């Protein structure tokens, strides 16, 4: 399947697929004309990548799940490594939220004084 076909099948864009390839998450082969070609199994892999990104993981985080990306990540039992990655990401998000909340509180206070 060509990159446009994979993008359509997974609800993403060719640009995102090239980004996943650059991150080492997809490994297309090249046709004689240089076009990227993907096996049918790439549909599952891309859907899993998108699922993990949608819950707040980064591409670096998703790389940790590489051995699981060809299965069903939504129903598979979590591994210790996967749980560690998810907990670490959650902690990072909590820190960012706290920082933004503090900034918002200071800005709101400054506006009240103005």
Image (tube, rainbow, N blue to C red):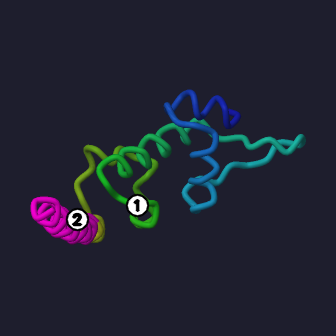
Q: Position of residue 64 (x, y in %)?
A: 41, 67
Camera-nearest residue between 91 and 22: 91
Is-magenta flag for residue 97?
yes
Q: Residues in magenta?
A: 86-114
Q: In which quarter of the image is residue 77?
A: bottom left
SS at badge 1: loop
Indicate the quadrant where residue 27 lies. bottom right
> How many residues crowd around disc 2 within 10 Å: few (fewer than 14), some, or many (20 or more)?
few
Relative to 110, 33 lies left or right: right
Instruction: Residue 43 in the image: state x and y as whole percent.
Output: 52, 37
Q: Which residue has dot 1 on it?
A: 58
Labelled pair 1, 2 in contact (Cβ < 8 Å):
no
Name the residue located 46 percent from the left edge and 60 percent from the top edge: 59
- Residue name at image x 62 percent, y 55 percent: 21
| Residue 85, percent from left and from top | 29, 68
**SS at mark 2?**
helix
Of the two numbered discs 1 and 2 in the rendering, the one whose residue sits closer to the viewer: 2
Residue drawn at point x = 60 percent, y = 53 percent: 19
Q: Quadrant of the N terminus?
A: top right
Residue 105 lies, in percent from the top left, at 13, 64
Q: Residues within 10 Å of mark 1 (few under 14, many from 20)?
A: few
Above or below, comparing residue 57 to residue 16 in the picture = below
Q: Mark 2 points at which residue?
A: 100
């Amino acid at each position: 399947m060509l990159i446009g076909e994979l993008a359509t099948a997974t609800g993403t864009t060719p640009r995102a697929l090239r980004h996943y390839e650059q991150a080492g998450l997809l490994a297309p082969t090249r046709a004689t004309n240089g076009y990227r070609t993907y096996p049918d199994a790439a549909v599952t892999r891309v859907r899993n990548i998108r699922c993990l990104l949608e819950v707040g993981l980064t591409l670096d985080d998703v790389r940790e799940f590489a051995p699981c990306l060809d299965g069903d990540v939504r129903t598979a039992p979590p591994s210790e490594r996967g749980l560690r990655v998810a907990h670490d990401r959650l902690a990072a998000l909590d820190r960012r939220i706290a920082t933004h909340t503090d900034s918002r509180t200071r800005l709101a206070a400054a506006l009240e004084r103005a």
